[in-house]
Image (spheres, rainbow, N blue to C red):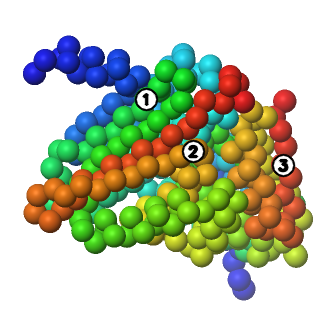
Amino acid sequence: MNQSPVLENLHIAASDYTPEIRFDVDGTFSICGKSYPENTFEFYAPVLSWLETWFTLPKQPPIVLDFELIYFNSSSSKLLYDLLDILDAHREQQDIRVNWHYHPENESAREAGEDFAEDFEYLNIHLQALA
Amino acid sequence: MRLDELQAIVEDHGIIFLAYGSSLTQDIIASIASGLEKNQEFSELGLGFSSDIFTVFVEVAQNMMFYGRRHPELQSGEGIIVIGRDAEGNYYVHSRNTITADDKTLIGDKLNTIQSMNRDEIRQMYRQLRKNGAHAHDAGAGIGFYEIARRCDRIEHAFSAAENGLFHYVFKSWLYARGGKS
């Protein structure tokens, strides 16, 4: 008999240069703050791997992923792309909604959200200006 | 050392932050970034403009940090990075470090290409490179320069010969004043 993987909620506290990450087993995911880690790949590897494991769980609730990033460097942008790529690979079997929150004054943040929405045109990505 | 001379240079050039030395670390970068955020003048620029300046600074500084780590033999103590503002309220990030002849070619080619592109071409190339998995901090090969180019109005670069076949590499990004809060 196959044993289901045991997965705990993934919570990583924010630092001066890394975002707060909350990935709950119930499908509520968020990445908030700044992202310019020293080693971006090492920082995001556990998040990507957690997500891959989550998709192996026997029953998966709908996903809502909220992004609220003020600053991120280009290597973080690559890792965020990789994360969305994992979601994109599962979009046909899974109800997924991605909310890209940006400050209305922050044109680059809006543009970054637009880029992701165009890169993953079949993924349900919503741009939302913060009030 | 005449510190008043240094003070005069800082004032003449509107320098807000300056880091000197070969060993830029993540903590130094983060503390300059955090100082920048707390700088009142900076915080009044509007989130869009300040975020672009911040991102350009981090991108340039991390490039220098990673370059220095990949080439410990070049740690000559000559790396310098400056954030400043001119009288018209235009901001700049100005840096100088020592690089190898091979990287001079690589970086020079990349920057010449970017300088020949318009804003939309830069944006499309950024997305293309990100999709193809280019590493952001490989010298001249990744998307870091495209990130900088997307956020600033003008980039300038120059190389000059240094000792032992190496080169001084000077890079300056300009972010023009956006007329108050943007």
Quadrant of the image containing the C terminus of chain B: top right
| Mark 2 residue type | Cys
| Mark 1 residue type | Gly
Q: Residue B84's mark?
A: 1
Spatial CA span between label 2 and label 1: 14 Å
Q: Nearer the viewer, mark 3 or mark 1?
A: 1
Residue B46 on image: x %, y %: 67, 26
Q: Secondary structure at mark 1?
A: strand
| Mark 3 residue type | Leu
For mark 2, name the chain.
Answer: B
Pointer 3 residue: A127
Residue A89 on image: x %, y %: 76, 76
Q: Is residue A84 left or right of residue B164?
A: right
Decide: few, some or many residues near mark 2? Use Cα within 10 Å; few <14, some 14-19, many ≥20: some
Q: Residue B140's mark?
A: none
Q: Secondary structure at mark 3?
A: strand
The image quadrant of residue A101 is: top right
